[in-house]
Image (cartoon, helix red, strand yellow):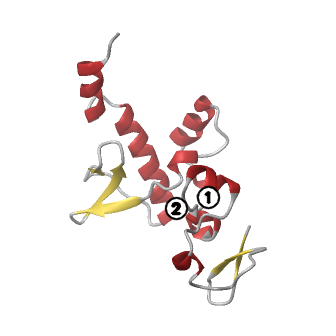
Amino acid sequence: MAEIRPGGAPKQVGSTSDDIDHFIKSDGVETERERLIGQHIGYRYDVNLLPDYRRLTPFLREYIEVMGWDDLNWLEDVHMGYEEGRPAVFDRNINGWVQVPPEMELPDNQQDRDMLARELLIKFQMSERHPLVDLKRAYAKF
């Protein structure tokens, strides 16, 4: 659990070191889960990276329920970004940005924009316009 210190810097509760260069000097992989996946989980230390589940869009709420998940899991690190000055969300599957339709109004709150980015990413990945659909058509056996 993270604790906020004066100045807003998060500190890992129970940490044996207050060394600010700890992650530079080490691989940053400390917990069993981090060792299992082989990488550092950043949101353990920065509570600002955790999504506020009260801000789920109706679509995301239903999506999580249909999928049988308790959380956003792989969507937690999806955020609204910008490509060429336009709001966009990064799709790792195609290694590219998906721009938000220009007529779409974005909320002022970053958490709300991030939830919208997650919804747009899922909808794009499920659409016929996603490039992986062409790959499936070309290489699917059945």
Q: Position of residue 48 (x, y in %)?
A: 58, 69
Question: Would you place residue 8 above or below residue 104 in this image?
Answer: below
Residue with the most extreme bottom position: 6
Residue 103 tag number: none
Q: Is residue 130 above or below residue 142?
A: below
SS state under label 2: helix
| 30 or 140: nearer the viewer | 30
Image quadrant for the C terminus? top left
The residue labelled by disc 1 is: 52
Q: Residue furthest left?
A: 84
Q: Which residue is mark 2?
A: 111
Residue 130 to residue 113: above or below: above
Residue 6 in percent (x, y) is at 68, 89
Q: Position of residue 36 (x, y in %)?
A: 62, 50
**Residue depicted at 42% across the width and 39% down the height:** 122
The quarter of the picture where residue 135 lies is: top left
**Residue at 36%, 47% in the rendered image:** 92
Q: Earlier in the sequence, mark 1 or mark 2?
A: 1
Task: Tell me if mark 2 has few (under 14), some (14-19) or many (20+) residues whose alpha carbon lies within 10 angstroms of its own.
Answer: many
Q: Quadrant of residue 34?
A: bottom right
| Rendered location of residue 29, percent (x, y) | 60, 63
Callout 1 amino acid: Asp
Residue visible at 52% across and 61% down in the picture: 111
Q: Nearer the viewer, residue 78 or 107?
A: 78
Which three-letter amino acid code belongs to the residue tagged 2?
Gln
- Residue 53 in view in this figure: no
At numbered mark 1, what does the secondary structure look like: helix, strand or loop? loop
- State if disc 2 and disc 1 touch (CB < 8 Å): yes
Q: Is residue 127 left or right of residue 102?
A: right
